[in-house]
């Protein structure tokens, strides 16, 4: 029986062999025909997103389309239908970015106002001021952290997804006969 180390070395060799034969900037796509319906186009785009997700964003992508029934249409019609479906996705990603920015700024403003009220209450001297001050400080930090999360983390994910879609839109598509 082989040891774990030997198995890992064998796996590393297989990965190395795969990396030598794979084309990094090329995605192969098999379609049944060049005139897919809307549901098929959505599936095609989802497959393209999955296929390009791990490729560096700064490089372009080449999509090699292999059609089982090339008689049904041409690559240009196929490409136009794919690009037509990418436009709404980009629109909704832009809306998500604006929504996240707006929510983040609102949460930041609310957190700042609560922090100001907390600071004002800290100068007051009544029995429950310390407790109320601490509750307001914690609440303000929750709002501020939520705003940071929306603006810097969630927007980043949406921006990354938008760049993936843009790269698919501008990819070079070619047909394999």
Image (cartoon, helix red, strand yellow):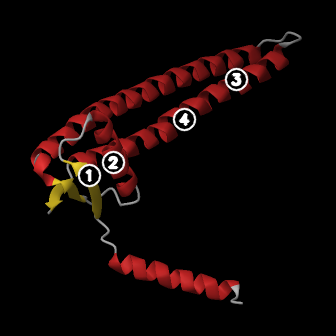
Circles 2 and 4: CB atoms closer than 8 Å: no
| Label 4 Cα neighbours within 10 Å, binned few <14 / some 14-19 / many ≥20 | some
Instruction: Pick whichever of labels 1 and 4 is earlier in the sequence.
Output: 1
Q: In the rendered view of the protein, which quadrant contains the N terminus?
A: bottom right
Identify the disc placed on residue 31. Answer: 1
SS at badge 2 = helix
Instruction: Pick whichever of labels 1 and 3 is earlier in the sequence.
Output: 1
Residue at mark 1 to residue at mark 3: CA–CA distance: 53 Å
Circles 1 and 3: CB atoms closer than 8 Å: no
SS at badge 1 = strand
Q: Identify the residue at horizontal 83%, vertical 19% (top origin).
A: 130
Among the 4 quarters of the image, the one containing residue 63: bottom left
Q: Identify the residue at horizontal 28%, vertical 65% (top origin).
A: 25
Q: Is residue 62 found left or right of 143 in the rendered image?
A: left
Q: Identify the residue at horizontal 28%, vertical 30% (top origin).
A: 88
Residue at mark 3 to residue at mark 2: CA–CA distance: 37 Å
Instruction: Pick whichever of labels 3 and 2 is earlier in the sequence.
Output: 3
Where's residue 171, x and y in %? Answer: 21, 53
Identify the disc placed on residue 139. Answer: 3
Name the mark nearer the viewer: 2 or 4: 2
Pointer 2: what residue? 164
| Label 2 Cα neighbours within 10 Å, binned few <14 / some 14-19 / many ≥20 | many
SS at badge 4 = helix
Among the 4 quarters of the image, the one containing residue 144: top right
């Amino acid at each position: 029986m082989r040891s774990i180390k030997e198995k890992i070395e064998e796996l590393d060799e297989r990965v190395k062999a795969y990396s030598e034969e794979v084309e990094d900037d090329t995605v192969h796509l098999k379609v049944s025909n060049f005139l897919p319906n809307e549901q098929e186009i959505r599936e095609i785009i989802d497959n393209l997103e999955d296929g390009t997700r791990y490729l560096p964003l700064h490089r372009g992508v080449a999509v090699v389309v292999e059609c089982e029934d090339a008689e049904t249409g041409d690559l240009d019609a196929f490409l136009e239908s794919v690009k037509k479906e990418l436009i709404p996705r980009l629109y909704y990603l832009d809306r998500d970015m604006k929504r996240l920015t707006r929510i983040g700024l609102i949460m930041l403003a609310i957190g700042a106002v609560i922090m100001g009220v907390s600071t004002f209450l800290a100068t007051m001297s009544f029995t429950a001021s310390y407790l109320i001050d601490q509750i307001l400080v914690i609440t303000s930090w929750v709002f501020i952290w939520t705003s940071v999360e929306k603006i810097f983390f969630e927007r980043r994910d949406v921006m990354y997804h938008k760049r993936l879609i843009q790269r698919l839109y501008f990819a070079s598509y070619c047909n394999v006969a």
